[in-house]
Image (spheres, coloured by chain):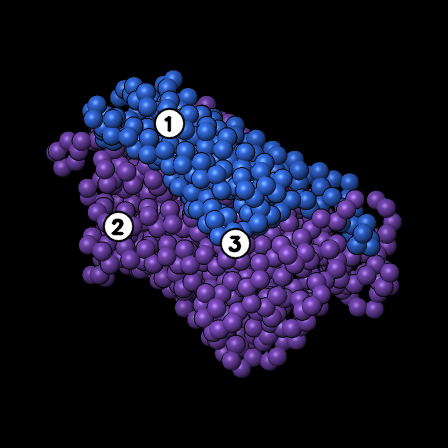
Chain colours: A blue, B purple
Amino acid sequence: MTVSLVLLAAIMFVVIGWLLRQTLNTQPWVPRSVDDAVSGTSIDTPAKTFGLVSFLAVATSLFALFISAYAMRMQMGDWRPVSEPQLLWVNSAFLVFASIAYQLTRNAAGKGQATRLKPGLVIAGLFTFLFLGGQLIAWTQLNASGHYLTSNPASAFFYVLTAVHGLHLLGGLWVWARSTAKVFSGAEADNVRLSVELCAVYWHYLLLVWAVLFGLLLTT
Amino acid sequence: MAYVAIADRDHEIEHHDPQTFITKYVWSQDHKVIAIQYGLTAIFVGVIALCLSVMMRLQLGFPDNFSFITPESYYQFVTMHGMIMVIYLLTALFLGGFGNYLIPLMLGSRDMVFPYMNMLSYWVYLVSVIILLASFFVPGGATGAGWTLYPPQAIARGTPGVDLGIILMLVSLAVFIVAFTMGGLNYVTTILQARCRGMTLMRMPLSVWGIFMATVLGLLAFPALLVSAIMMLLDKTLMTSFFMPAVVSAGVQTGYESGSPILFQHLFWFFGHPEVYIVALPAFGIVSDLLSTHARKNIFGYRMMVWAILAIGGLSFIVWAHHMYVSGMNPYFGFFFATTTLIIAVPTALKVYNWVLTLWQGNIHLRVPMLFAIGFIFTFVHGGLTGIFLGNVVVDLPLSDTYFVVAHFHMVMGVSPILVVFGAIYHWFPKITGKMYNETLGRWHFWLTFLGTYSIYLPMHYLGFLGVPRRYFAMGNTDFMPESAHTLNASITISAIFVALTQLIFFYNMITSLRRGKKAGPNPWHATTLEWQTADTPPKHGNWGHELPEVHRWAYDYSVPGYPDDYIPQNVPAELAPVGRDHGRER
């Protein structure tokens, strides 16, 4: 549980620290005119961005708890490490490319370059599908090598962790599909800028999570 | 510094004006309608859980007199009662119900920032409730694993509902967590992003502070339940061995390997203890507002109350293993968790002192919401003190499996928040419906409930000291249990039935008042917070008409010297009313 505890402590430290900063040196019982009183207490960012950041905190908690469970379970005597399929390296490269493509699309949307949105989104989506397809193939390879879901907790964790990560990407692809459809129906860059920006952040986050999970699976 | 709240920036608010009956009352995106949907659904399942508890008590008080209560069904009643009350009633009602209703209104916003997701949150919650209730009707019935669902017995042969019941329970929990996350992201974002002009964080009513921190806890802690539900579901359905150890069942090796039941307990309580505060913090906040409003006095130590909420929120993540002293974990952990448990009692006690000091020299109006609020202080202090006993390892070990624990957690987490729920319903009923409730019936409801619950749980502590074990279907004839303990059990059962029937007064009062109650007017309690300052009662869609309110003062300007009324609403400009509390003297 140490892993999740440290991560959650970090999240709580940020949240509570920020809140404390807002509440120290205040005299709430003293009425003031509106302009004096409202300074610095709201976060100057679109609500959807804030919503995504909050969701990432939830997802972080979820993955951290899975990793904690992994760390605790591997101490039991029946743990037999799995040799991961080499295909995972290729899949990881696909996810890196997807993330880069999304970042370039995000930059294009920020600059209002509508013509670069279509190829950017298509490439980002394509690499994401390649990653997910590759993960499925990795599952079949692992299965073929005799590492079933039930054969050992190490292989069971492999399937579960990759599945949970993949499901998060699938959720992201739903938003990707919506913004791609908008772009192909002629939407201006400004209309999809926020959605592309948030998707890029989400893809980077899931790349980071994959890096941690892959590292964990490789080294244990 | 620039003003950055988005409440009055229309382009960031999704428009969702209801056009038809369906979009107004069924697929509604209005936070008030969603709040009522959440509230009614939660109360509906709560009534089911109440009936289950009566059946449990019938067996315990008058063993073997009721043929329809078998050992299997008894454990199913226990399990479903606990899970429904904690998750599907209290969590859903405080956050989905009161959170939805109060956050936008108290903060001067038109709605939640993601209304569509808010609507989805309710319907997904309803799906989780339906899945849960469906488990009563599948072959084998609902799970009887106990509300903590500990493996291995939760999925081992011999436990009721081991086939489909446990699967439906786990799926229902996972669906509930999805619903909660959608709602929770809304509450947090709305509180931080959509407050009206002038509504600084430190001008927010404590109800909103409590709901806010409880939501943060829920967002971070519910994933632990989700992780354990997913892994146990795989253990059950696909025979993985995350939690299931190598066990022999009915003389047959089950096929599981060396899974770790303790791992499940850690994950469960990593969620489970913050869950206590997910329920308690909104109750703390709401009770603070009830006390202040009906004592006509500012809340004592507002800043301390806020900091205590923050401290409790942070500390609640490092006390989980005090539920596991008897699990066989490393004894040194026990020392650590006993210490953190004592530490978290400090900000909690601080809140109790401040509630009492708020009452001190107040102009106390003993209306129904106030009665429930004061009743809460009694039951919470009672349950809190027994918690300090149980937080210590050496005291917990002999008491852990007895009725002392049942009495403790029902006082602190059952009766106390339920009293606040009732107080809050009576308090905001005039705003929600535009009608006044029947005061006399409300008083009867309070006194009978308050005294009735004491007559249930006070004797239970004594049973615990006698060593009467919890979780048993029947006690049988045991030497250590005197005849008086059996008599007491019967008495507790009679009280439980009495309290359950007393709730009919509440429902009768609500229904008749809704139909025939006196018109309430916009602000019957002369309260300061924004929800009482709406142009319409009940507030219409969009809450505030054309202009959003502006806030000029905190939520607790009661009995300010020099002002003709004994309250100054938050939206009264500074120049129109004297400053609060100490006439502006800097402290």
In the picture, measured across the screen, residue A115 lies left or right of residue B250, that is right
Left or right of residue B194: residue A185 = left
User: What residue lies at 68% left-to-right and 56% top-to-bottom?
Assistant: B9
The CA span between labels 1 and 3 is: 41 Å
Discs 1 and 2 share one subunit? no
Image coordinates of residue A123 in percent, x first then y, are: 44, 36
Q: Chain of mark 1?
A: A
Secondary-structure class at tag 2: helix
> Would residue B37 appear left or right of B302 to someone viewing this image?
left
Name the quadrant containing residue B394: top left
- Give the camera-side residue of B40 and A112: A112
Residue at the disc numbered 1: A91
Kindly state the secondary structure of the residue where label 3 is placed.
helix
**Nearer-the-camera pick, B326 or A138:** A138
Q: Residues within 10 Å of mark 1 (few under 14, many from 20)?
A: many
Q: Nearer the viewer, mark 1 or mark 2?
A: 1
Q: Nearer the viewer, residue A172 or B442?
A: A172
Q: Count how many numbered circles sit on residues in the image.
A: 3
Res. B95 mark: 3
* Residue at point 75%, 58% (across, down): B551
Q: What amino acid type should be assigned to the residue bearing mark 2?
A: Gly
Residue in view at x 60 percent, y 70 percent: B540
Residue reaching furthest to the top: A219
Instruction: Name the residue that disc number 2 marks.
Output: B165
